[in-house]
Image: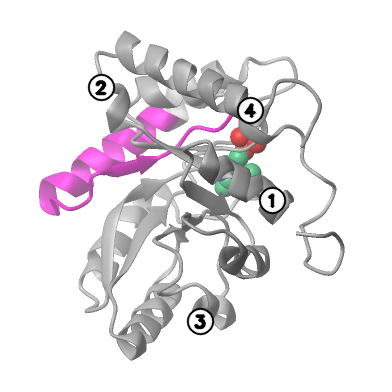
Amino acid sequence: MPKGPDLATRVRQVRERLARAAEAAGRQPADVRLIGVTKTHSPATARAAVAAGVEELGENRVQELAAKMPLVDGARWHLVGNLQRNKVKQVVGHAVLVHSLDRRSLADTLSRQASELGVVQRVLVQVNVGGDPAKHGCGMDEALDLVAYARDLPHLTVEGLMTIPPLPGPGAPPAEAARPHFAALRHLRDDAKARFPEVVHLSMGMSADLEAAVAEGATMVRIGTALFGPRAAGPWRPQEVGT
Ligand SMILES: *Cc1c(COP(=O)(O)O)cnc(C)c1O
């Protein structure tokens, strides 16, 4: 664990930020789910998060997710990063929610694997709201078609949309820079929900911009640094450190 406040204190601080942001927006704090993003951190840290009441955990790499999942009792895991089709087997039936559906071919593979396991996989469609070439996600103009396509597959359910806004320019306050992107995702979600009522969730907001995300209607925020401190340079690997 990093120096500074202990994890329980950080969890309390993040929950207070979420509660204040929810109240300022006239929303219920309970309507915003906290997902602790444990990438690069050890399973021991993930277990400590669960012990501190953060049971929903997220990873952005499949390999790291698969390595950590069996070592952390009581967690519900989210895949928040890019998913390649050849890694779908490690995810379907294990992750409660895949936040990164961004193309039809991936939807097909996810549904096929879910069908083999006899499960329905819950997913979010990831949208590249900023049109940032460095980011994954379908385009704004493709999102509704992808939602419609994926929800028609027998073993997928599309429960909402996810985005990662572009990095703010140098010196720009992250929350203000992100806010119009969060608003755009919310409008898109509203359009999708008008056609498909199960499309309710908005996964948006990270450590630096969670207030703006909650103000724009986030139902899930993905928080790493504010809970777990700075990240290691690379992914956590089982052989490197004790668990
Ligand atoms: C790392 C990561 C986060 C958490 O970012 P912080 O700024 O550390 O809170 C959220 N979402 C995704 C997709 C990530 O990869």
Residue placed under numbered mark 2 in the picture: 28
* Residues at circles 4 and 1 in contact by the CB criterion of under 8 Å: no
What's the distance in space between the residues labelled 4 and 1, CA to CA?
Answer: 17 Å
Q: Amino acid at mark 4?
A: Ala
Query: Which numbered disc flags the more N-terminal residue, 1 or 2?
Result: 2
Residue placed under numbered mark 4 in the picture: 226
- Residue 48 appears at what percent x and percent y? 61, 43
Q: Amino acid at mark 3?
A: Lys
Residue placed under numbered mark 3 in the picture: 89
| Side of 11 where 32 appears, left or right | left
Q: Residue furthest bottom?
A: 116
Residue placed under numbered mark 1 in the picture: 44
The range drawn in magenta is: 182-208
- Classify mark 4: helix, strand or loop: helix
- Classify mark 1: helix, strand or loop: helix
Query: Which numbered disc flags the more N-terminal residue, 4 or 3?
Result: 3
* Residues at circles 4 and 3 in contact by the CB criterion of under 8 Å: no
The quarter in which the N terminus is drawn is top right
Residue visible at 81% across and 26% down?
3
Residue visible at 54% across and 77% down?
90
